Amino acid sequence: MIDREQVVHVARLARLELTDDEVGKMAAELSSVLGHIEKIGELTLDDVAPTSHVVEVANALREDLPVPCLPREVALAQAPAVQDDGFLVPSPQA
């Protein structure tokens, strides 16, 4: 499915340097992956509901309830540097 030219093209786009042996190996591996994808494409999935997880997940997220904030003084007490009632962070290097 995937020939050497296509592997070389994709490697160049990804800025990868591949040896001739690696190009041949990648062509075979990518062809195998595409073969599996084609096989999946042959499945009839009309009656399969979309899902975000492959296994049932219960209680993955807690209810989002508002809670009181940490007092500013407590939050800043262990800060290495404070300025204008907030954390002082170094400016990014140019």
Image (tube, rainbow, N blue to C red):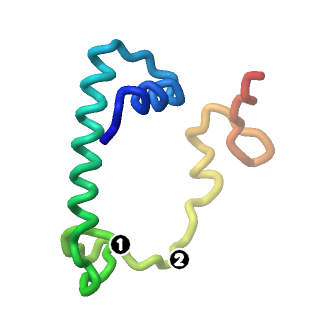
- Residue 92: x percent and y percent? 72, 28
* Label 2 crowd (10 A; few <14 / some 14-19 / many >=20): few
Kind of residue at disc 2: Pro
- Residue 12: x percent and y percent? 51, 24
Q: Name the residue under label 2.
A: 66
* Label 1 crowd (10 A; few <14 / some 14-19 / many >=20): few
Q: Is mark 2 on a helix, strand or loop?
A: loop
Query: For residue 52, which quarter of the picture?
Result: bottom left
- Residue 33: x percent and y percent? 25, 45
Mark nearest the camera among 1 and 2 is 1
Q: In this view, does 4 lie to the left or right of 57?
A: right
Kind of residue at disc 1: Leu
Q: Mark 1 points at which residue?
A: 61
Residue lying at the far top of the rendered structure = 19
Q: In this view, does 20 lie to the left or right of 58?
A: right
* Quadrant where the C terminus is found in the figure: top right
Residue displayed at 23% across by 68% down: 42
Question: Is residue 22 positioned above or below 32 on the image?
Answer: above
Query: For residue 28, which quarter of the picture?
Result: top left
Q: What element carries label 1?
A: loop
Residue displayed at 42% across by 27% down: 5
Question: Is residue 45 positioned above or below 88 on the image?
Answer: below
Query: For residue 69, which quarter of the picture?
Result: bottom right
Q: Quick check: marks 1 and 2 in contact, CB under 8 Å?
A: no
- Residue 55: x percent and y percent? 19, 70
Question: Toward the viewer: 92 or 26?
Answer: 26
* Number of disc labels: 2
If you read the primary sequence from the N terminus, does the residue marked by circle 1 or circle 2 appear first?
A: 1
